Image (cartoon, rainbow, N blue to C red):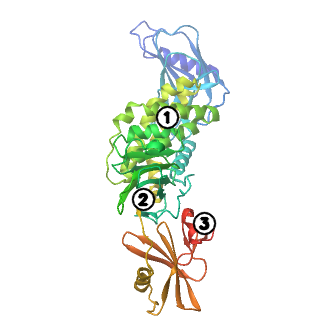
Amino acid sequence: MRALVASLAVLLVCTGIGACSGGESHDLHVVLARDLTATLPPGSPQVTARRVQVGAGSRLIRPLTAAEHVAAAGRLGGRAVLTFHVGHVSGRPFLAWLNGATWVPVPSSYNAKAGTVSATVSHFSTWAPFTWAISQIRAWVRSEIGNFLGVGTATEPTCDPASGLVVTDSNPSHHTIGACAEPASPAAAAGTVIIQVANLRGYPVDLSYPALVNGLCGEYGKCVKVRPDGDEWLKVGSALSPGSNKILLPGSSTATVIVGIPGGQTVTLRTAVDEPAMFMAFLEVGVGVLASIIGKKIEAVETTGDALGALATSQCLADDAQQGSGPLTLGVAASLATTAFGCVSSELPDVLDKLGLKESGLILGGFGVAADLIPTVLSSVWGVYDAFFGSHVLAVGRASCPSAAVIKQALAQQLSWWRPGYTVLATTITCAGPYVVAGAQESPQIGGGVLIEQEASGLKVLTVGSGPLCTTIAADALPGQIIYVPLQYGHALGCVN
């Protein structure tokens, strides 16, 4: 077999190229192994290949054929082309050479019809053809998308339930935002209110607050502050949402907004998952995928920090800061995701070089594959997650406790079984935030309680009964019987917890 290969190599070198007959010089086409050929510049020395056993050494790639150690008997007069026959494979096959224990990919061309992958090389060493571990990279992308769409770690904000301040949410059934309000300290100006807005999900939201909020609020410092302190994503958000009276609130964070509310009036805050918020979300996905690709915990953490620092001052953020305000369709989301991954990718060479990671070539290539997979993976989950992105209008103001007569009127309008003889006891009315609990009697011996919510349109009867009316544990709620009430109001209302 070796003799046959050697004879074929001589035949290829001397047939139709003039190298053995003194004619015009042409490139030399040499068969080095069963699945490997080389195209050499004229006058090249003898080139040989020897099969070697070398593992892939990376989760990002898998070999398509055995590695070959290619060597030349002398110096090449120019660049050579190595071509491996790999058959028909999916993805983007490429060639890589072994540098110590690390494979270094090079720009390659795949001929799907011929089943070959080629690359122009400037040196010989150990070479092998690879394809990307598509299923693994896709799993990382899907996992990171799931992380940012998942439940966050922020808790429901708590305020003084006896403050008389109420926050009305325009979208209470979409419980992704928690909010409450209470008066500022007695030393603050009259009517000054502290509003807390918690992002209960893992994705960012754009928070718009009243234009009358100033930069500093006396003893409270900044009028708009976000916890946890020092979140690097806040810097990225500032670059993406540079307009006044708006801030990108990272997932699992809580904003404190201090504002003056004139007597009898309300102020309005808004949250939305708009294009700037979604763009920032996909930046987070990109950095998370990068950390998964690197794998090693210390390096991944360092890379995440360096990537965030680079992104905060990146030109690509400045170019994409002015996002649109239309509906978030799948097409818009896919475009934002692709642009965000491109933004992360533009900063990667400097970040990886700073960290001195040996597999930087594979990391860059693997991240490029992840960027290509983003539209497909997003499309497969969009139908499930599209419903997550609810907007909220939060109206904050002082609410007086409704009278027994007003409550009785609401009960008569909303309860078909209510009779004129039934009464509401003024002495049993308790208010906490937007919620009202009142005692209702059919007779001195028969009665129960009613739980009502104060909305902008009026009173809404939530439940009536003689047992527990509410709970502060969402999982314990029973539709129409025991209503979930946020913890900050539950104690005053006597809810089960």
State the SS at label 2: loop
Residue 281, visible in the rendered structure: no
Q: Quadrant of residue 390?
A: bottom left
Q: Earlier in the sequence, mark 3 or mark 1?
A: 1
Q: Which mark is residue 57?
A: none
Q: Nearer the viewer, residue 389 or 333?
A: 389
Q: Amino acid at mark 2?
A: Gly
Viewed as shown, does residue 46 lie left or right of 456? right
Image: 443 above or below 328: below
Q: Position of residue 401 (x, y in %)?
A: 45, 72
State the SS at label 1: helix
Viewed as shown, does residue 204 lie left or right of 214? right
Q: How far is the residue under mark 3 from the one under mark 1?
A: 37 Å
Q: Amino acid at mark 3?
A: Ile
Image: 361 above or below 196: above
Residue assigned mark 2:
390
Q: Which mark is residue 308?
A: 1
- Could you tell me which quadrant the N terminus lies in? top right
Label 1 crowd bin: few (<14), some (14–19), many (20+), radius 10 Å: many
